[in-house]
Image (cartoon, helix red, strand yellow):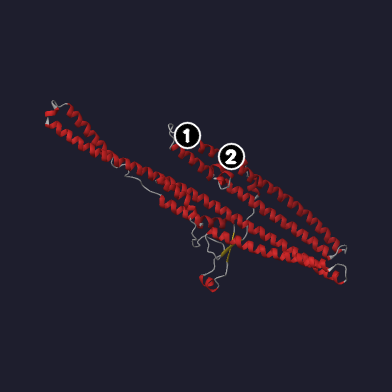
Amino acid sequence: MIRKLISALLAGTLCVLPVLPAGAAGETPPATQEEQAADPTAVTVRKMGMRAVRAAVEEGSPTAQVLRKTAASMDPGSISGATGGSSEAEALQGLIESMTAAMEKIGNPEDSLLYKTYEAQIKVLQIQLEGLQQSASSAMQGMTALLQLEDAAYQLRRQADNVAGQLAQTAQTLLITIQSLQYNKEQIERQIAALDRTIAAAEVQLSIGTISQLQMDTYHNQRDNLARSLETLDVQCENLGSSIALLCGFDAGTVVMPSRISLVYAADLREMSYEDDLAEAKANSFSIWQQRNELRQAQNVYDEDIPATGLSVQSARDALEAEQQAVESSFATIFQTVKDSQAALSAAQTAEQQAELDFHTSEVQYSRGMISRLEYQQAQDTLENAKLAVEMAQLNLTSAYNQYDWAKQGVMSTAAASAQ
């Protein structure tokens, strides 16, 4: 019964996700109650960085809080006194044995009053001993149940830490995604500005009949589509910011936006060591620990006379091996993603250098009247887009390394874990 209770607690706690009040740290203070009362539809924007988001999620995540509270409620604390009747039972057993030995020394036991007295006393003592033995058995069962509760509480604490890590990683990824969308907005705004210049020139061409109205309509349609894309990006950023706020445990009227995302340091990239970092990831992996725990539980109930228990042990051992291989595979993918992101950043920096050279050439040509102002502005846009591409590549590298750093801490998704 106790095992079913523990299983239900372990499986069902994650289903409980209450909306808790805000309390995690942020870099921008929330709106006051008076401000919210004045405009209930107003959105409070918190500017937060990667570390602030992680701290807020790990401290304020409703899911992690539920798991930790459940683990605390299951902790039995001291289990002293569970073996209280063992010494008394041993004394009774010794008394019975001494009386039995004395009875054997009595001659003509059928006619001896002392023999009958001993016999009656032994029956009473045996009843008392049986009662103590049953109590001792119940006490041992109770102690086993307490140990199982302690084990379940420890599992919940580990699960709470893992869930908090996964949610913090998710929140950081969403924060980086918002920053990436803001870069996309900047790029679209530049495209709109360039298209406005084109439309202004096209209006002159239309007035003298060098282009058709259809071409002009095409330009305006392109601009309208870009403007709608900006609106869509704004909505996406706000939705993602609301998701981060929810993960942090903030109220529904709060939106989290990135303040300044620290880029990965070159020293961190140089210190990457696949073998050492993989060993660290496997040692910290919650999914591997979980499979080891399943194997331990299967081994605890193993009985060589019951074939099914042997199959359970082998199945748990196979699952552990599969999870270890899945972690190795996922870590290799994450490691390679960091290397690919480094190569992409290097390529973007090379392209930026070339764009700067081309722009300097355009500057000279424009000063000498060799190219038009529109062509000169296009060269400016090309350079700005190249610089923006470098910033986006740096952000992608930061995101890839952040995943790598979480993987070393044991927080990563694997195909084997997802299939369970």
User: In x, y percent, where is residue 156?
Assistant: 46, 49
Q: Is residue 314 above or below residue 196?
A: above
Q: Is residue 201 visible?
A: no
Residue type (three-letter) at the residue carrying disc 1: Gly
Circle 1 packing at 10 Å, graded few (<14), some (14-19), many (20+), is some
Q: Residue at x 86, y 61 (%)?
A: 365
> Marks 2 and 1, how far apart in space?
23 Å
Badge 2 or badge 1: first in the primary sequence: 1
Asked whether disc 2 touches disc 1, contact meaning CB atoms under 8 Å apart, the reply is no
Quarter of the image for residue 94 reads: top left
Question: Of 394 and 249, which appears nearest the observer?
Answer: 249
Quarter of the image for residue 51 reads: bottom right
- Which quarter of the figure is the C terminus placed in? top right
Q: Which residue is mark 1?
A: 310
Q: Residue at x 68, y 49 (%)?
A: 341
- Dot label at residue 152: none
Q: Is residue 82 above or below residue 252?
A: above
Outermost residue to the bottom: 38
User: In x, y percent, where is residue 262?
Assistant: 63, 55
